[in-house]
Image (tube, rainbow, N blue to C red):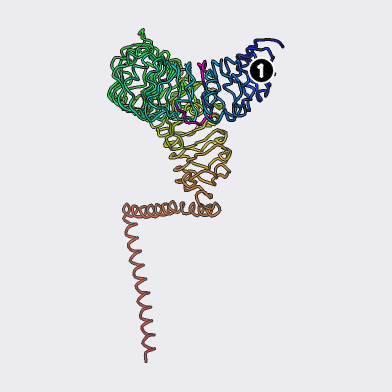
Amino acid sequence: MSAEYIHLGSNTLTGQVPKLPIHISRLDLSSNSLSGSLPSELYAPALEDLMLANNQLTGTIPLSIFQLTFLYRLDLSGNHLEGDIMQCWKESDANSTSQFGWDLFSLALNNNNLTGQFPKFLASYNNFNDFLLKENSKSFGKLKHLDLSHNKLDSVLVEEHFAGLSNLEHLDLSYNSLILAINQKWVPPFRLKVARFQSCQVGPNFPEWLKGQSNIDVLVLGDANLDDVVPEWFWVTFSRASILQASGNKLHGSLPANLRHMSAGYIHLGSNKFTGQVPQFPINIARLNLSSNFLSGSLPSGLNAPLLEELLLANNQLTGTIPSSICRLTRMKRLDLSGNHLEGDIGQCWKEFDANSTNQFGYDMLSLALNNNDLIGEFPKFLQRSSGLMFLDLSYNKLFGGLPEWLPQKMSHLKILRVRSNMFSGHIPKSLTFLDSLHYLDIAHNNISGSIPWSLSNLKAMKAVVSQDTNYNFYEDSIQIIMKDQKRDYTFAIYKLLVILDLSSNRLAGQIPEEITLLIGLTNLNLSNNQLTGAIPNQIGDLRQLDSLDLSFNGFSGAIPSSLSALSYLSHLNLSYNNLSGVIPSGQQLQALDNQRYIYIGNPGLCGDPVGRNCSTHDAEQSGLEDIDHMPSVYLAMSIGFVVGLWTVFCTMLMKRTWREAFFQFVDMMYDMVYVQVAVRWAHMMEKTQDGAP
């Protein structure tokens, strides 16, 4: 083949990377399913572009790559390449006249498993004498794009590592074990536009060398070990940046009162230690995350940010009510005000907009979290316009009234519904069963009464294991849930896989519908602290995905179904304080559970090793106990018979005089007879005593 340009990217090609045509100048095989190692010999002296990103390539980077002296762009990102990133360079002759990198414009080795130190070949002066330094001064001098992120590089970087990169504009070193030990007074030779240092150790001091990088459009300093006050120049230098991310540090102090001069469309300063009030938002902001700080006071009354789609202010110390200006943010897709001290009517700011209003707030909403506040009121009616809503959390407030019947009609895409720890009452709406996508339902700790609808078995998303492909791209943070009697934080990558039905701590009565065992995707079933009775369904073992099962503090009776032993994923079980009886089932998974005794405590009718009762002895004791249990009824019958007989005779004598006289004559006669007999016997005994005296 004599082709100079081959572009077969974004297909479904498999197999190994082929031998290259000798005259090829550009090769793009990216985004396929190519596997195996790279060819050890890549003889293509005219090759300028080599694009093999997003395949399944393994092995190390071959030495022959560094013999491609005319390379303009090299992209090996998104593979499984491994080994010391410097190994091939170490194997080359340090005194060679190779001109690799002289024309290199873009180098992308990100998202692999490369190890070792920061590539020394990027700073050709290193370990070279003055002559070689002069000869190699052109190496990588044209490099504008460098991405080594998502590898396993381990180095301490100083100013000299970047000295030869005078044209560098895009630098991404994120997700490596790199330490930037750079002098605060250093003046970089480059003018960056993109600087990403996520999970690198940049701090503890805020990097002063960034002060002159006013061309930066994207700055990422998340989890960078920063423990400092954000300098005032930061808000000026990066006023034109579109993305500013410095979450997961220990940045402190207060934010500027007004950020309206900022051009940023995305600001993420969450999980720091900022204090003070929430500032006025940048006019063009689309995504703002200030969650998990120590911000206090009320929300700004005038939130003029017409492009805002995502507002995350969770886990602060905010007070007051939800301002009406939030309800004018018509592009809002995700709103999280959870974990604060907000109060007032949950629907107050929306009440001014009736159903016929031209205000479009809520129409694009995907996620709403108002949990862990002090909000009051009924289930918010404005959600009737949020047909695309997937995540709703109103838990831990003071909401009351019933759960609405219109949920499936108005929010047909709902996947997660959490309203636990409120004051909701009434029955479980049967219409909930029409929420085809609902795989997480938590209405625990309310005043819900009635029975468990058998129709809950129609929840389609709970009847199958949730796919890992479930789309929650709008949610990137962790969510706290109660599972296995503990509060746990789950990232949405895990959270989206949980299939949970939690109806605990309500006033539900009746039996568990047999149909509930059709929800074979359930990972957590909690019906504890209710007034449920009857037997545990025999088919409970069909719920093979169960990780946690809690039926404690109810009135269940009968035997524990042997099918429980089939639950191979079960790690938490609580059947305590019921009226269960019989032999506790055995099984490898059941016997591996912790705190065996407490699983079954409060069920005196159970026997088996977990409760320390021998079942044969227990049966005999139970039989004796049953006999003893019958004795009170026998004594009661005897007492009733005696009283009835006595009063029958007594009442008859009261009613008839002749019977009364006859009765007393009979008593006198019997008295005389007994007296005579006793007197005669007594006299006879005395005579014998006297005759026998000496």
**Magenta run includes residue 156:** yes
Q: Position of residue 365 (x, y in %)?
A: 42, 16
167 falls in the magenta region: no
**Vertical arrangement, residue 198 with respect to residue 632, above or below:** above
Compare residues 522 and 292 and report the one nearer the observer.
Answer: 292
Disc 1 on helix, strand or loop? Answer: loop
Q: Quadrant of residue 189?
A: top left
Q: Amino acid at mark 1?
A: Leu
Question: Quadrant of the image for the C terminus?
Answer: bottom left
Q: In the image, residue 67 lies at what x, y percent?
A: 63, 20
Say whether residue 203 is left or right of residue 562. left
Q: What range of the chain is rendered magenta?
A: 141-158
- Residue 313, x across and y down, in percent: 36, 23
**What residue would you read off at disc 1?**
13
Considering every residue shown, the one lying at the far bottom of the view is 694
Q: Nearer the viewer, residue 315 or 187?
A: 187
- Point out the image quarter for the N terminus: top right
